[in-house]
Amino acid sequence: MSDKPKVKVATVWLGGCAGCHMSFLDLDERLIDLFKLIELTSSPISDLKEIPVVDVGIVEGAVCNEENEHVLRTLRKQCKVLVSLGDCAMTGNVPALRNQKTLDETLVRGYIETESTHAGEVPNENVPVLCKKVRPIQEFVKVDASIPGCPPDADAIWYALTELLAGRKPVWNPTNVRYD
Ligand code: SF4
């Protein structure tokens, strides 16, 4: 086994559907090889409240609310290389569909016109404060590399991570970007 210290990685999930993280798990047995090289210090399923200092931060999802923005800015401070995972992080993609309506129209649609647990009222506490518009992460912080796709498939994630671990930036073309 290599004496090189493992690359510390943290992943976060902002506004999105978690499909990109599920694709990450589709690496299956390649995860075993990956975990010889990296240490996943925190992820959406860990109990850590604070994001630790890491080498690589991976972000899935767009910025939809103030909490998303705080998590993103914290991760940017805590990591050397920031990677966007999937099209929601890169472009806003699916969560940004709500940008076609105003925030008030969105809240009415979500809580009053649609059956919800809030009995026809827009809640004003215990819910994240929504941003007026959903925005991709590079509008808030510097992004060093991206993994496109919705979701990126496991091969794309594997390619990107192995390139980054080798000190190279992944290069994308129509043969290695997939939209399943
Ligand atoms: Fe889900 Fe696609 Fe967004 Fe990933 S890019 S979080 S799979 S909608």
Image (spheres, rainbow, N blue to C red):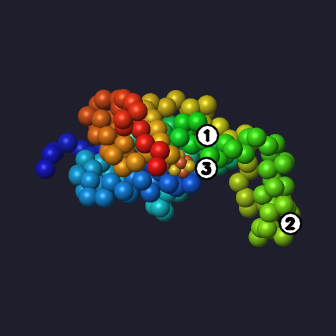
Kind of residue sitting beneath label 1? Gly
Q: Amino acid at mark 2?
A: Gly
Is there CB contact under 8 Å for labels 3 and 2?
A: no
Mark 1 surroundings: few (<14), some (14-19) or many (≥20) residues within 10 A: many
Q: Amino acid at mark 3?
A: Gly
- Residue at point 73%, 41% (across, down): 99
**Circle 3 sits in a helix, a strand or a loop, which is it?**
loop
Give the percent coordinates (x, y) of residue 44.
Answer: 49, 57
Pick the front one: 33 or 174: 174
Task: State which tag comes first along the sequence, 2 or 1.
Answer: 1
Q: Residues within 10 Å of mark 2 (few under 14, many from 20)?
A: some
Q: Position of residue 166 (x, y in %)?
A: 26, 34
Please tell me which of labels 1 and 3 falls first in the chain.
3
Name above or below for residue 74 compared with residue 25: above
Task: Name the residue at 57% across, 43% down.
Answer: 88
Q: Is residue 124 above or below residue 104?
A: below
Name the residue tied to disc 3.
15
Mark seen at residue 92: 1
Q: Which mark is residue 120?
A: 2
Which of pointers 1 and 3 indicates the residue nearer the eye? 1
At 68% from the left edge and 47% from the top edge, which residue is drawn? 65
User: Where residue 139 sits: x, y (%)?
Assistant: 61, 31
Mark 3 crowd level (few <14, some 14–19, many ≥20, 10 Å Cα): many
